[in-house]
């Protein structure tokens, strides 16, 4: 296998570890080389493994286990072509640069090997379609079901969803009718390489997920434990009776939020409409100082005023995930979630409490 190809696989393996910036693995990290030469990286992350099929030639005629660090020390020196055993505890890696002796480890000391019996589950157009959901998961250990991305069938339709309880991103996706609901760990979703082929397989009995990858013609896969929890009934929080709508200029809104945050340390803000224009008004609850932005969008319903307060950081997360100049917002009551929609999919953002009835636009 060429060094350049191994480089890409190692980069994919690294993204699955907690520290994606370093080529470092703990003592449990193990390379399993099967009889047919497949390379399986075990113990690189909790309940996750990465396999490269037909990676190198195995001349030993049996499974070989070695610390990943041993393989990496040789990988940096050239193309690795084959492996063979020398003694019980050592092997040789045969490369273009020469032959290197490396340490082996007993199979009993290696992390568990995950071997799923897969059934096709769902399809995505690209890694980008799924990777963007990772930013919306919860980091609360008391809410394990929300620490991953849900994929499954609800009310006869396939959905993908991620939420931390304050905001939510969801969309329709192709899920096979009999496929079980699954929750993908956030680290797997964040680490999806661009070479991912877009399909997800599952082994519901073992609670395993399986993703296929193609790197320079070498097939590879990521196998992982799914999160065995019940995902919240997210469809119940999606508002269906919105009667207010506005269009937000994403760049103008981001600029207004930044000004409000850096100039006056304003701790809360609200959208409000003045005629046809949408504005952002922020207030420092300690000093009472206020800031009213220039127009950041348009009011679609001139005869219906729109006022709603949000957490600034959560709104910024939604705005920076959009790939379009404009994003629409649909709302009903100030105390109910608002729906933000553009090409990157619908988002639901829950409001924060603020005295909107007595909110007077600055300068009015």
Image (cartoon, rainbow, N blue to C red):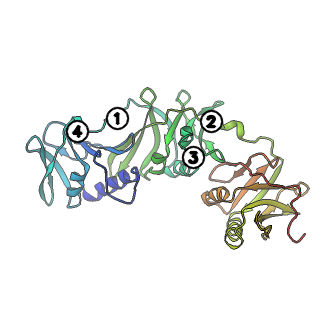
Could you say which is closer to the camera, residue 208 or residue 298?
208
In the displayed structure image, the side of residue 76 where residue 288 appears, left or right? right
Is residue 363 in view from this perspective? yes
The residue that disc 3 covers is: 138
**Mark 4 to mark 2: distance in Å?**
41 Å
Q: Nearer the viewer, mark 4 or mark 3?
A: 3
Mark 1 Cα shell of 10 Å, populated few (<14), some (14-19), many (≥20): some
Residue drawn at x 84%, y 47% as measured from the top left: 243
- The answer to which of marks 1 and 4 sits earlier in the sequence is 4
Residue at which label 4 appears: 34
Mark 4 or mark 2, earlier in chain:
4
Q: What whole-number distance in Å separates the C-alpha atoms at marks 2 and 1?
A: 28 Å
Along the viewing direction, whichever of 109 and 344 lies nearer the viewer: 109
Q: Residue furthest left?
A: 87
Q: Quadrant of the C terminus?
A: bottom right
Tell me what residue is drawn at x 27 percent, y 44 percent.
30
**Image spot of residue 336 (x, y percent):** 77, 45
Q: How far apart, in angstroms, are the residues tagged by discs 4 and 3?
A: 37 Å
Label 2 element class: loop
Q: Residue 220 sits in which quadrant?
A: top left
Vertical placement of residue 242 versus 280, above or below = above
* Residue 1 showing in the rendered view: no
Q: Residue furthest front?
A: 286
Q: Which residue lies at the image location 57% right of the left edge and 32% below the top edge?
A: 230
Pointer 4: residues within 10 angstroms few (<14), some, or many (20+)? many
Q: Earlier in the sequence, mark 2 or mark 1?
A: 1
What kind of element bears circle 1?
loop
Q: Are marks 4 and 2 in contact (CB under 8 Å)?
A: no
Mark 1 highlights which residue? Answer: 114
User: Which residue position holds label 2?
Assistant: 232
The 10 Å Cα crowd at callout 3, few under 14, some 14 to 19, many 20 or more, is many
Q: CA distance from mark 3 to mark 1?
A: 26 Å
């Amino acid at each position: 296998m060429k060094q350049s190809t191994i480089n890409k696989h190692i980069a994919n393996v690294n993204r699955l570890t907690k520290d994606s910036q370093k080529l470092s693995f703990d003592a449990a990290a193990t390379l399993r080389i099967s009889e047919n030469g497949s390379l399986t990286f075990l113990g690189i992350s909790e309940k996750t493994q990465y396999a490269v099929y037909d990676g190198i030639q195995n001349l030993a005629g049996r499974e070989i286990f070695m610390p990943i660090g041993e393989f990496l020390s040789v990988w940096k020196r050239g193309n690795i072509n084959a492996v063979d055993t020398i003694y019980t505890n050592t092997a040789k890696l045969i490369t273009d640069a020469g032959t290197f002796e490396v340490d082996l480890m007993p199979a009993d000391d290696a992390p568990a090997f995950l071997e799923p019996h897969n059934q096709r589950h769902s399809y995505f157009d690209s890694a980008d379609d799924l990777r963007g959901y990772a930013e919306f998961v919860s980091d609360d250990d008391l809410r394990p079901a929300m620490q991953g991305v849900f994929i499954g069938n609800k009310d006869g339709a396939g959905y993908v969803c991620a939420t931390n309880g304050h905001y939510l991103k969801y969309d329709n996706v192709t899920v096979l009718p009999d496929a079980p609901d699954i929750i993908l760990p956030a680290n797997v979703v964040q680490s999806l390489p661009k070479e991912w082929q877009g399909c997800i397989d599952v082994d519901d009995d073992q609670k395993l997920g399986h993703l296929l990858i193609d790197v320079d013609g070498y097939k590879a896969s990521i196998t992982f434990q799914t999160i065995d929890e019940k995902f919240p009934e997210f469809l119940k929080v999606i508002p269906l009776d919105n009667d207010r709508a506005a269009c937000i200029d994403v760049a103008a809104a981001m600029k207004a939020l930044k000004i409000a945050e850096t100039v006056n340390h304003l701790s809360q803000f609200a959208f409000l409409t003045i005629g046809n224009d949408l504005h952002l008004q922020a207030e420092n609850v300690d000093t009472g100082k206020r800031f009213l932005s220039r127009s950041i969008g348009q009011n679609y319903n001139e005869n219906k005023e729109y006022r709603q307060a949000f957490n600034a950081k959560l709104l910024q997360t939604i705005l920076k995930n959009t790939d379009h100049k404009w994003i629409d917002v649909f709302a009903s009551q100030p105390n109910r979630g608002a729906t933000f929609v553009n090409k990157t999919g619908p988002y639901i953002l829950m409001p924060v409490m603020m005295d909107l009835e007595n909110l007077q636009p600055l300068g009015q």
